[in-house]
Amino acid sequence: MGVFETIGSINKISPVYQTPALEFEGNDFMNCVIEIESTLSTQKLLNKILSIEKKMGRIRNKEEGNNSRLIDIDIISIDDLVKKTKTIQLPHPRAHKRKFVLQPLHDINPEFIHPKSKKSITTLLKKCTDTSILEKQSKWLRNPKKDFTISNYNYIAIEGNIGAGKTSLATLISSDFNAKLILERFKDNPFLPKFYEDQQRYAFPLEMSFLADRYQQLLDDISQYDLFKDFIVSDYDVYKSLIFAKVTLQEEEFVLYKKLFNLMHKDLAKPDIYVYLYQTTESLLRNIKKRGRNYEQDIEVSYLEKINKGYLEFIRNQQNLNVKIIDISEKDFVKNRKDYIDILKEIVN
């Protein structure tokens, strides 16, 4: 597994430069710099890099020193962090002295400020005493994000039960693929905490307020974008309103609610793909407990099971909706990037 699959999203890749061995006799090196966005801690990031090197055939030893090697991945800098431990020093202590680092770093971010010297990469490159001759190569490294055709969709809706991970997945996709992100504004609904205390009394005002909010948000937000050019990902679809309402409302209330829903729904854009994240009830309850919203802690198992049944019934009855059901019960795509990559593959395949 490579950098994108194990560490994080690759934002920029510099040209590749052929450079002579520095401070020892040996074959030329091929060097480049990449900019990565990752949620890993410094130590976990270093561990992942060492693992990648090992899989690519590098064998490290304590007396290694400066010599030829199959692969060498260094962390140059992490934002403006200045840090020194037994295993890592940031920024890299020799980066500012090496033209094969400064030149490709300058190519992707000439305004980058060295965290320790407080000088720009442009200034450091000009003052660098390294006289090595760098030969820019005609072939560039390909960003592995391009192998994921997820951005071929213009509008993706991520759906699922309470605690399924809709917002987390939508946010990750938005970050990795520069998508416009639409998140449900459930925190602003004053009826939600009351509903969990007295469902029968507050079900109708809750579902009506959610319907109005979702309709207005999707109408406003999507109208800002060009559905033929922009890539949009949302953590809900407006059909969510109908699914929850069928579970929570009395029969007479639902008949009225459905009439209003059908009037409003026809004005809204339909997603190119509808992704349903399935989790077992047990895993949903664990997630709900973990995120710690007080008003959710007493959700009954039967309620979650009814919601899941409602979603699956809705999906079965869809004729013109491109639906992907993905079982993520045994996955943790927030902590384990491999799980996240597997989900992306299921979406596009």
Image (cartoon, rainbow, N blue to C red):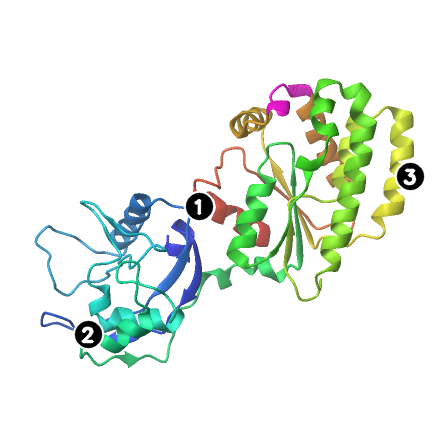
- Who's the residue at 18% across and 62% down the image? 69
> Reading the chain from its start, which is encountered first: label 3 or label 1?
3
> Reading the chain from its start, which is encountered first: label 2 or label 3?
2
Q: Residues within 10 Å of mark 1 (few under 14, many from 20)?
A: many
Q: Which segment is the magenta one? A: 294-302
From the viewer's side, name the closer residue of 342 and 268. Answer: 268
Residue 104 on image: x %, y %: 33, 71
Q: Residues within 10 Å of mark 2 (few under 14, many from 20)?
A: few
The CA distance from mark 3 to mark 1 is: 43 Å
Q: Amino acid at mark 1?
A: Arg
> Reading the chain from its start, which is encountered first: label 1 or label 2?
2
Which quadrant of the figure has residue 132? bottom left
Give the labeled residue for mark 3.
259
Q: Amino acid at mark 2?
A: Asp
Callout 2 secondary element: loop
Say whether residue 349 is visible. no
Give the labeled residue for mark 1.
337
Residue 167 on image: x %, y %: 59, 42
Mark linked to residue 28: 2
